[in-house]
Image (tube, rainbow, N blue to C red):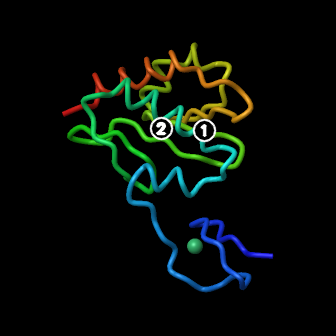
Amino acid sequence: MKWKCPKCGREFDKREQEHYCFKPQTIDEYIALQDEKIRPVLEELRAVLRSALPETEERISWSMPTYWKGRNIIHFAAAKKHCAIYPGGEATGVFADELSPYDTSKGTIRFPYDQKLPVKLIRKIARWCYENYAK
Ligand SMILES: [Zn+2]
């Protein structure tokens, strides 16, 4: 039985093998390190953000996939049972009504993997972030 490092996803023959955790440098690498089952959802989320934010650059910032234009516009990240977008605390306030079906906290919106992504709403929030944050 191989052991999989929970931090970087690499597999080793020895449990708790000491190693230098590889940190993803690109969104492709980030998604490739996630569980196979959730990769399609992350690819979809990425496609939605990329098409909503054509002016931005994709990069990794704060260890998360990030859309950047002069500053960070929006991040996303994968967790075990959900993926999340991080549009900033102001945005979660502005969209509070539309976000009521979702698990949110200030600046964070979580989407469970067993539900369809609200593509239109994600696009709208991403555009709002761009209009308000881009430099
Ligand atoms: Zn590791």
Residue 125, how many percent across, how many down? 44, 22
Residue 36, how many percent across, how many down? 66, 50
Q: Is residue 50 above or below residue 118?
A: below
Report if the CB atoms under discs 2 and 1 are less than 8 Å apart.
no
Front-lying residue, 71 or 116: 116
Query: At 34% across and 49% down in the image, what residue appears?
Result: 59
The tag earlier along the polypeptide, 2 or 1, is: 1
Instruction: Measure the C-alpha gap from mark 2 to mark 1.
Output: 19 Å
Image quadrant containing the C terminus: top left
Query: At 29% across and 28% down in the image, what residue appears?
Result: 54
Mark 2 nearby-residue class (10 Å; few <14, some 14–19, many ≥20): many
Mark 1 nearby-residue class (10 Å; few <14, some 14–19, many ≥20): few
Query: Which residue in the protein does label 1 denote?
Result: 40
Going by the picture, which residue comes out furthest to the right?
Answer: 1
Picture quadrant of residue 50: top left
Where in the image, quadrant-wise, is ligand 1 located?
bottom right
Kindly report which numbered mark, 2 or 1, lies closer to the viewer in this rendering.
Answer: 1
Query: Which residue in the protein does label 2 denote?
Result: 86
What is the secondary structure assignment of the residue under circle 1? helix
Front-lying residue, 95 or 45: 45
What is the secondary structure assignment of the residue under circle 2? strand
Query: At 69% across and 49% down in the image, what residue appears?
Result: 80
Front-lying residue, 33 or 89: 33
Inspect the image, locate mark 1, and give the three-letter code of the amino acid beneath it. Pro
Q: Is residue 85 left or right of residue 131?
A: right
Query: At 57% across and 32% down in the image, what residue appears?
Result: 109
Residue 67, how many percent across, how many down? 35, 39
